[in-house]
Amino acid sequence: MAQPDRKAELLVVTGMSGAGRSTAANALEDQGWYVVDNLPPQMLQTLADLVSRTPEAIPRLAVVIDVRGKALFNDMRETLAAMEASGVEFSVLFLEASDESLVARYEHQRRPHPLQAGGRIMDGIAAERALLKDLRESADIVLDTSTYNVHALSKAVADLYTTDGPVVLHLTVMSFGFKYGLPADANYVADVRFIPNPHWVPALRPRTGKDVEVRDYVFKEEGTRKFVEMFTSMLEPVFNGYRTENKHYATIAIGCTGGKHRSVAVTEEVARRLSKFPRVTVNVEHRDIGRE
């Protein structure tokens, strides 16, 4: 019996130095990916062509490319554009972190930033952000590792790139507080500050949206249930469009004032409903719980 054609998966892992590329590479290797680290961008097309011709040999290839290649990295955009024009299918994972997190990591390791030269660590970080700006904007998924330790990042990468069969769409449903700023990687943002705030109920103030008392308070409002129903229904054609456009990752951010009560309760319910959609995996994050 003839076997169905199988295409190899090609993932380009890049991002800020110190944001966890090595940890991500190790997590992918644990998931069965063949990982090539610090590949010059000029060799990416050749490697992609080789893998596409023999997908049974290397069905899942992850290539780590970063500014350690110095001048060679300048051709990265042109290389990816040429691959896309030639019909090579690939996705890009961009690892991000805040300036404060990156500085702390470099100071802890007592190592210089690769673009630091004779200046400060922040000089190297600023130069790298400028160099990677366009690549970050075109990435399929941007993963902010500012609050992750090694184990949390490994789990996040494993959840995104599991080998348990073909998963078409990976969703992150995230609660957040508007007073702490919008999530940088959100594809859709919902504002649930229209819901009465449990913060003003003394018995509920110390609790979070994960607690049943807060959830009951939030969902006793008819408008809350109607919003959740309409919001999740609205996303279904969006997800279908993502699949058509070969987009595999999306972040749905739901915010209230502090990211503790309303947004958490609504996020949990939205995630529960979205997890019932076909060919979807859902990861829940509560970004700002504990920040008050």
Image (cartoon, rainbow, N blue to C red):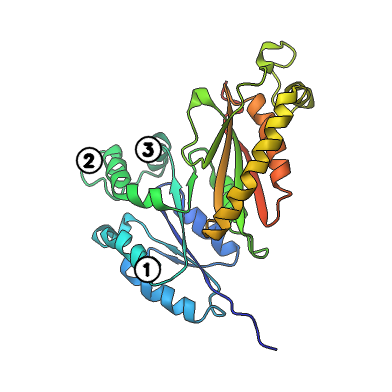
Q: Quickly name the residue at label 2.
A: 119
SS for callout 1? helix
Q: How far apart are labels 2 and 3 at the CA level?
A: 13 Å
Image point (23%, 59%), residue name: 71
Image point (53%, 73%), residue name: 8
**Mark before the other along the chain sequence, 3 or 1:** 1
Image point (74%, 22%), residue name: 221
The correct choice, above or below, for 40 with respect to 99 in the image is below
**Mark before the other along the chain sequence, 2 or 3:** 3
Along the line of sight, which residue is nearer the eye, 98 or 282? Answer: 282
Q: How far apart are labels 2 and 1 at the CA level?
A: 39 Å
Along the line of sight, which residue is nearer the eye, 178 or 51? Answer: 178
Horizontal side of residue 14 vs 67, given as left or right: right
Q: Quickly name the residue at label 3.
A: 103
Image point (50%, 59%), residue name: 25
User: Which residue lies most toward the left here?
Assistant: 118
Counting from the top left corner in percent of width and height, residue 203 is at: 75, 13
SS for callout 2? loop
Along the line of sight, which residue is nearer the eye, 216 or 150? Answer: 216
Counting from the top left corner in percent of width and height, residue 32 is at: 59, 67
Q: Specify few, some or many for label 1: CA neighbours under 10 Å numbering under 14, 14-19, or 20 or more.
A: few
Image quarter of residue 265 = top right
Q: How far apart are labels 3 and 1 at the CA level?
A: 38 Å
Q: Quickly name the residue at label 1.
A: 85
SS for callout 3? helix
* Screen quadrant of the N terminus: bottom right
The correct choice, above or below, for 107 with respect to 243 in the image is above
**Mark before the other along the chain sequence, 2 or 1:** 1
Counting from the top left corner in percent of width and height, residue 276 is at: 74, 49
Residue 40 seen anywhere in this rendered image of the structure: no
Q: Nearer the viewer, mark 2 or mark 1?
A: 1
